[in-house]
Image (cartoon, rainbow, N blue to C red):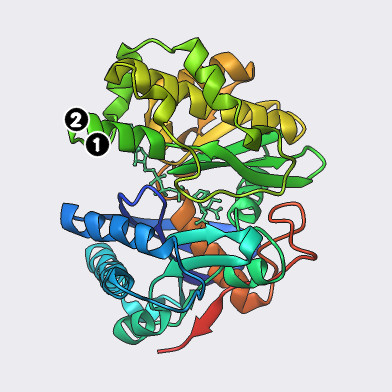
Amino acid sequence: MRRIVALGLMSGTSMDGIDAALIATDAEDVEAFGPTAFRPYSVAERAVLRAALAEAAGLADRDARPGVLAEAERIVTDAHAETVESLLARADVDAGRVTLVGFHGQTVFHAPDRRLTVQIGDGAALARRLGIPVVYDFRAADVAAGGQGAPLVPIFHRALVRAAGLEGDVAVVNIGGVANVTRVGADDSLVAFDTGPGNALIDDLVRERTGAAMDRDGRLSLAGTVQAQTLAELIAHPWFDLPPPKSLDRDAFSRAPVARLSTEDAAATLAAFTAEAIVRAIDLAGGADAIVVCGGGAHNPAILRNLETMGGVPVTTADAHGWSVDFIEAQAFAYLAARHVAGLPISFPETTGCPHPMTGGILVRP
Ligand SMILES: Nc1ncnc2c1ncn2[C@@H]1O[C@H](COP(=O)(O)OP(=O)(O)OP(=O)(O)O)[C@@H](O)[C@H]1O
Ligand SMILES: CC(=O)N[C@H]1[C@@H]2OC[C@@H](O2)[C@@H](O)[C@@H]1O[C@H](C)C(=O)O
């Protein structure tokens, strides 16, 4: 495919806000990274999204938008449109130069074993408002074919690892609300799956105990002591021994085991839980010579320190390789949109457990 400019949009399980990023790509290689933007959700918008998760838990039809889901979808679509408009205005890029938008939407329910995954966000409305073709609903086809529908970024991780010429077996770890790993083998093989909790348990704990949205810079976690017995209880969950492919919904794990701990010890123990789950997953994937961390968890030194201690291999963050800790997923959805148009697969038996390499997403023109 010829080189195009694609704009990717990600609103992840942390529900902190919308990441947007421009890239130039031919759907195989990433030729350049462009400007980025972040638009946080307001406290009120976040409350609607949290209510939407609760509402969606009972969904049987992925197209239904009962109760608060219709309002949540409008909020998601409008907020994404605003994010694109402000990115393009600030970067002084004409919308006509953007060939394609990759729109992940907001996951409100994910149960691949029931062949159901729901990302809200109206792709057609977004395309109309922006005047740019939009690819959206990336996970549906994979789940309908019996795949996990997640993770989808691994093919992008591999393109970056190849381009950087990283040696040995490399584990790229995304620590968002949920965490996922992509192991790129020295032989170019790919294995990927969700590892367990990312930041969601820590965010929820901190919101409940202090009202803050996150444990900024890991301050609480660093001030606390990991409670070994509680950590052992958390990691005893059967999920961690399950063979891949596997993927998680945001609220798959309970923070009940840390309920009686001080806020600091609870945060420290949850940060260690996230790290231990990642290290176990890397072992399950075949081991790695190096770990590269991206996603918001890369800003939490308590998670990084635990990863270094438990992983026993060098840990770097994505920024150290010229990638973006915060925008790698948005860039990935720009790349996946380009792959849709090029007719190239976005999911694989080794990443989602789908029966054969599969394309994904729906293209709508304005
Ligand atoms: N300075 C910081 N200190 C500590 N934690 C941080 C910091 N910045 C971001 N985070 C954490 O990262 C989270 C956001 O991460 P990110 O944007 O990668 O997640 P996401 O894309 O929403 O989730 P997912 O990858 O699961 O879809 C925040 O909710 C917070 O927990
Ligand atoms: C169902 C869903 O939205 N899953 C997300 C979530 O957030 C992280 C992890 O769980 C990953 O599997 C996925 O997102 C990334 C972008 C992916 O598909 O690769």
Residue 150 in the image, given as x and y percentages of width and height:
60, 56
Q: CA distance from mark 2 to mark 1?
A: 6 Å
Give the x, y percent position of residue 366.
40, 89
Q: Where on the picture, by quarter, is residue 296?
A: top left
* Disc assigned to residue 270: none
Q: Secondary structure at mark 2?
A: helix
Using the image, determine if residue 67 lies above or below residue 212. Answer: below
Relative vertical location of residue 250 with respect to residue 356 in this rendering, above or below: above
Q: Residue at x 48, y 17 (%)?
A: 230
Q: On the image, numbered disc 2 is attached to which residue?
A: 210
Q: Residue 9: x and y, percent?
A: 41, 63
**299 or 73, which is in the foreground?**
73
Which image quadrant shows ligand 1? top left
**Residue type for callout 1:** Arg
Looking at this view, name the residue that lies furthest to the right: 187
Figure check: 89 above or below 29 = below
In the picture, residue 340 is in which quadrant?
Answer: bottom right
Q: Is residue 24 visible?
A: no
Question: What's the residue at 52%, 26% (across, down)?
Answer: 234
Vertical side of 132 occupied by 60: above or below: above
Q: Amino acid at mark 2?
A: Thr
Front-lying residue, 232 or 167: 232
**Residue 151 visible in the current orientation:** yes
Q: Which residue is mark 1?
A: 207
Q: Are marks 2 and 1 in contact (CB under 8 Å)?
A: yes
Q: Using residue 54 as the reference point, say whether residue 137 is left or right of it.
A: right
